[in-house]
Image (cartoon, rainbow, N blue to C red):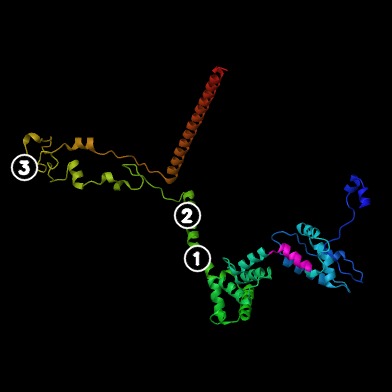
Amino acid sequence: MAGQAQRTLRELANPNVIQQPLCIQFPTTDATFELKSGLIHLLPTFRGLAGEDPHKHLKEFHIVCTAMKPQGITEEQISLRAFPFSLADKAKDWLYYLPSGSITTWDNMKQQFLKKFFPASRAANIRKDICGIRQLYEETLYEYWERFKQLCASCPQHQIPEQLLVQYFYEGLSLFDRNMIDAASGGALVNKTPQEARALISNMAANAQQFGTRQDNPQRQVNEVSVTPIDQKLDSLTSLLGRLVAGQVQQIKACGVCAMVGHPTDMCSSQQEEPTQQANAIGGFPGQPQHRYDPYSNSYNPGWRDHPNFSYKNQGGQQGYPQQNWNKQHAPEQAPNSGMSLDEIVKALAENTQKFQQETRASIQNLSTQVGQLATSIHKLEAQNLGNKPS
């Protein structure tokens, strides 16, 4: 203490060059031990990311260390010396910040490693996933079984008995695969022991991998059948468009009277009058009474008689309206044949649409110009009003 009191502030602020020991306290051994570069390159790498599996890392590390263990060196000694070389990034920082000499055995190292990167909350989440596992859409039995085994292996401390594991897997099966397993088990899977049920499921999954296909599922076949009509409709629509482009569609003729598309000339509604009226209007048939459409005839006024002053005779001596003059004045004019093809109708519609768009753009452009001029005028008026205000 007296010597330290005599040191200056500069000397006291100098960094400590004495290196602190690592957290691992290696066991003493009489044999010479040296890590080869080949062993270091074969070690797996764990970075401490959220998606990494620490249990898988320990298994891979154990395989490499047991495969290249020198003679006279125990597994614990080589594992403690090689484990720091398998860590990187966050995992290596965690190892360096542990207290010095806090780890003395390999089991202690594994316990600290799993406590850090596999906490109890992560184990609880995996346990929930195991309990609620379900077979995905179009997932085969083999793929579902492999996913279930991988999920169970990622958490060895899930503490779920074998009976519940088989039950959770069976409840998550699709209806088709569940019926197949029941049929293979002799009626129901519950009649077998957990070990027998697991062996049966494993054999069926292996068989599905070797010989099964995705098209064996009837649900997939139903989906394919339901899609077929849609494909046929699309093919029909494509064929129709091809015929339109090739000009194979029959031309649609317009009506010669009203110039409307949708009915021929002889079926126009303006021509659908009583034959008797048309015949009387143009002169009538031989022997047909001519005074039927006379407003002063007995047909309209049954109590009156024909008056000679209200009727006249033409030059031919026949009573009634002049046939020739009425035909000239009241006969409907025949509209010219305005038959248009479908291409011409579409072309005319496109031209009208383009013209309307051009007019709309011009109107919007004029409106924008006027709004801009109005904004400029308002800005000038505001500037004048600000300049005229007293200070």
**Residue 112 inside the magenta-drawn segment:** yes
- Percent position (x, y) of residue 249? 43, 50
Q: Nearer the viewer, residue 346 or 221?
A: 221
Residue that carries the numbered disc 1 in the rendered image:
225
Figure check: 211 above or below 268: below
Residue that carries the numbered disc 3 in the rendered image:
303
Q: Earlier in the sequence, mark 1 or mark 2?
A: 1
Report the quarter where the C terminus lies: top right
Residue 332 figure quarter: top left
Which amino acid does the dot numbered 1 rest on? Val
Question: Is residue 228 in sight in this rendering?
Answer: yes
Q: Secondary structure at mark 1?
A: helix
Q: Earlier in the sequence, mark 1 or mark 3?
A: 1
Residue 176 figure quarter: bottom right
Res 254 label: none
Q: Magenta residues, as a range?
A: 108-119
Circles 2, 3 touching at the beta carbon (< 8 Å): no
Residue that carries the numbered disc 2 in the rendered image:
237
Q: Secondary structure at mark 2?
A: helix
Q: Nearer the viewer, residue 309 or 299?
A: 299
Q: Earlier in the sequence, mark 2 or mark 3?
A: 2
Which amino acid does the dot numbered 2 rest on? Leu
